[in-house]
């Protein structure tokens, strides 16, 4: 009988240890790995932008055709001062599982950055760097700033966080019906999971493009301390 009790106890201890190790891996190690990957994505973008030809003062260059967004590849960096002045995340094309493990994901088929329509982006609330952990702190008037290496785009939040269900795909429509917008414009939608450790619902914020400026003009006002 003692042997049985000891064996069962050892099994429970082993199972408990495995559970603890899994939680540590989920909470800590995936975050460490994701932070490293996101930093690499940002470094890669910044190096790519540095190699771009500089604009010549006083010379009006013919605008180049927009570069297509490539699935799983970064094309922009997002900053949200409300979440901290050191908060910055790469934005990649697509919202597949592997993509969202490397940063934020742009919903394919929605508008390009800064263009008319609804530039829509998803991010994990928890795990893989917890990019949108503090999403509920976002408020009306908060700035969401993005850059593509040539231009700064400053959006201002108009509504949110709005809670809905995952099947409510209208939130990323060109003119989201529940956003309060009534006509086409240059909008931004951010989405993440709710509750914090679940995915039964989604939290949404909507924003409009407030201003743009060339990178050569320095950082926008929203990013200055």
Image (cartoon, rainbow, N blue to C red):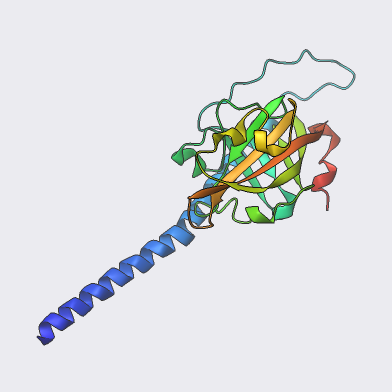
Q: Residue at x 43, y 64 (%)?
A: 24
Q: Could you say which quadrant of the image residue 218 lies in?
A: top right
**Residue at the top extreme of this rendering:** 62
- Where residue 83 sits: x, y (%)? 69, 54
- Where residue 47 sits: x, y (%)? 64, 35
210 over 193 or under it: above or below:
above
Q: Residue at x 75, y 15 (%)?
A: 63
Q: Residue at x 37, y 65 (%)?
A: 21
**Residue at the bottom extreme of this rendering:** 2
> Can residue 47 be seen here?
no
> Can residue 203 be seen here?
yes
71 over 8 or under it: above or below:
above
Nearest to the observer: residue 161 or residue 223:
161
- Figure quadrant of the N terminus: bottom left
- Where residue 2 sits: x, y (%)? 12, 87
Q: Residue at x 49, y 54 (%)?
A: 127
Q: Could you say which quadrant of the image residue 42 lies in?
A: top right
Looking at the rendered structure, the number of numbered marks drawn on it comes to 0
Q: Could you say which quadrant of the image residue 19 lies in?
A: bottom left
In the image, taking residue 60 as reference, residue 116 lies left or right, namely: left
Nearest to the observer: residue 40 or residue 221:
221
- Where residue 126 sits: x, y (%)? 52, 55
**Residue at the left extreme of this rendering:** 1
Nearest to the observer: residue 95 or residue 32:
95
**Residue at the right extreme of this rendering:** 58
């Amino acid at each position: 009988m003692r042997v049985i009790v000891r064996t069962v106890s050892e099994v429970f201890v082993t199972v408990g240890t495995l559970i603890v190790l899994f939680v540590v891996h989920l909470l800590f190690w995936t975050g460490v790995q994701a932070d490293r990957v996101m930093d690499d994505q940002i470094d890669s973008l910044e190096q790519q932008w540095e190699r771009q030809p500089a604009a010549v003062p006083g010379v009006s260059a013919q605008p180049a055709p927009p570069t297509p967004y490539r699935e799983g590849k970064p094309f922009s960096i997002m900053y949200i001062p409300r979440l901290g002045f050191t908060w910055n995340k790469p934005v990649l094309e697509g919202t597949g599982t592997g993509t969202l493990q490397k940063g934020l994901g742009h919903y394919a088929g929605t508008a390009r950055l800064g263009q008319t329509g609804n530039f829509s982006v998803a991010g994990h609330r928890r795990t893989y760097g917890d990019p949108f952990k503090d999403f509920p702190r976002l408020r009306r008037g908060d700035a969401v700033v993005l850059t593509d290496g040539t231009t700064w785009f400053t959006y201002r939040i108009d509504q949110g966080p709005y809670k809905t269900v995952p099947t409510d795909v209208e939130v990323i429509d060109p003119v989201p019906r529940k956003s309060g917008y009534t006509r086409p414009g240059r909008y931004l939608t951010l989405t993440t999971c709710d509750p914090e450790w679940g995915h039964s619902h989604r939290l949404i914020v909507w924003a409009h493009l407030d201003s743009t400026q060339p990178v050569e003009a320095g950082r926008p006002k929203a990013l200055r301390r």
